[in-house]
Image: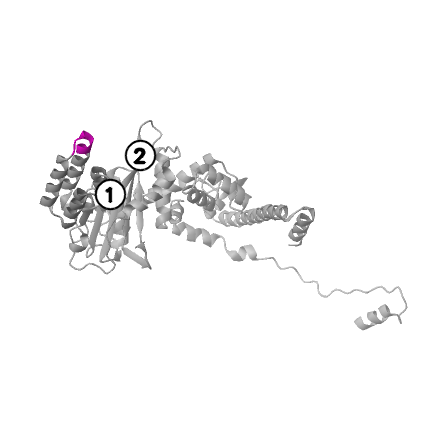
Amino acid sequence: MNKIISKIYQIIKDSSNLIETEEAIQVCMYEVFAELVGDVFTHLNQVIKEQKQEEGWKVKREDWKTVQFIFGSVRYCRTLMIDQESQNHYPLDDWLGIRKYQRHSPLVEVKVAELASNVTYRDTADMLNEWTAVTISHQTVGSLLKRVGSAQAREDEESVLELEESAELPEGKKVDYLYAEADGVFVRGTKKKKSLEVRHAILYEGWNKNGKRVSLKEPKAIMTTKKTAGFWAEIQAFTANHYALQQAQIITNSDGGQGYTADKFQEAFSQSNYPVLNQLDSYHVFQGLNRAFGVKTTIFKQQVKQALKTHDLDHLTIWLDTYESTLDETSAVEKLTTFRTYVVRNWDRIFDWCEKVEQAPKDARGLGAMESNQRRISFRMKKRGMHWSAEGCEAMVKVKQGMFNHTLREAYLHQQNRSARNQRKLNQTVRLSSLLHEKTRQSVGAKNGTIPLYASRSSAIGQLIKSFR
């Protein structure tokens, strides 16, 4: 401690201003912490090595390893050992949860992925270099994001497989109503003139009101670039693991595009005893209405809106035909025909879900939260000249999904190949008492000594010596 205080004092003395002082103290703090943690890890290695030797393991050699932690690069000594089955192990790395060839701590990897999900790889590297002891390139940022994102993807895949192999559904949360919306968003791929579709679904239990502000209640997201079958399998596995839907009414919403039809929702939520209600997304309906009639308000547009609201197909047909008779341009007729086809094809899905249930909940509102939630993807992954590989795109959306659902860190740690059973076994190997225990030293008793007197006994120092006797 005295050494650290002396070093800080010297830094303050040598610095010309407070900015330089603080920066130098920060670097010093990182170095001290990294050195101390390295010493602790080396000590842990010695304790584990001795324990393994008692179990019959043999020492092969001593190696040094450097791992980048959030507070600096930690260098520690580890022992390569051979077990009874002639397999090589680094017991310390197993206990710490460090993978083979791993150069960054789990926290650094997760933090890099979380930061890169909101800003570019270069900005992520610059911010880390500026604010932490982590020095990293933008290429490494991309590699770490793919590693963390793939951990969440594997976790989702395992959830699907477990559901397929399970003899019964897991016990989940019981809800009266569950709301689901799904849609896709396209991002540019690395191949010329080829895009990647990010399939996106949100699930929620209702709405929370705070004054005039409304937010979704317990929202969850599923995102992937997989094909349609894989996307809906993940939705089904997620809901089966989190909810008991036998007595729940499922309300769904989509634009009716390919891969987001009513039968897909019915299949994904088939555990419910009630028919799944699927309504056509009103945003896409009125978007098509504006394309066909223009943004200005006209008598034709008002009457078509009224027909949609009252669900009167005859009234709708009359006004569409009347408006079409007024058009001269071929392009305008084509837009109207496209709108007519879209509405008529999905006519049975144009309704207010509150009118379809016996007793709507008190917080009932219209569905349509998907479009605003799509910005979570589009703001980060579209425009600005961005192009995505299939692997990078899947990793990015899985990181975003894990952050939104608060499952990313749990999924990452679970995929570190360190089970709870192995964790308990390793904890038994290294006990805190062995680290803090200091060997007792033999007492030599009280020591005798004298204070030399270079003055008369009647002097002040002489009188002081007499008082000690």
Going by the picture, which residue comes out furthest to the right? Answer: 456
Does dot 2 land on a helix, a strand or a loop?
strand
Taking the image as shown, residue 384 lies to the left or right of residue 321, namely right
Q: Is residue 406 left or right of residue 32?
A: left
Q: Secondary structure at mark 1?
A: helix
Mark 2 Cα-neighbour bin, 10 Å: few <14, some 14–19, many ≥20: many
Crowdedness near tag 1: few (<14), some (14–19) or many (≥20) residues, C-alpha within 10 Å: many
Relative to 108, is 324 above or below?
A: above
Name the disc covering residue 251, or none.
Answer: none
Q: Which residue is mark 2?
A: 196
Q: Main secondary structure of the magenta part?
A: helix
Magenta-drawn segment: 327-334
Task: Looking at the image, tell me whether mark 1 or mark 2 is earlier in sequence order.
Answer: 2
**Residue type at mark 2?**
Leu
Q: Which residue is mark 1?
A: 232
Q: Position of residue 341 (x, y in %)?
A: 15, 37
Depth check: 42 or 366 in front?
366
Q: Is residue 338 visible?
A: yes
Where, quadrant-wise, is the N terminus in this rendering?
bottom right
- Residue closest to the eye, 446 or 38: 38
Q: Quadrant of residue 451?
A: bottom right
Query: How many numbered circles are shown?
Result: 2
Task: Give the x, y percent position of residue 308.
Answer: 16, 46
Picture quadrant of residue 334: top left
Residue 349 seen: no
Q: Is residue 112 left or right of residue 179?
A: right
Determine the residue positioned at 18% across, 38% down.
Answer: 339
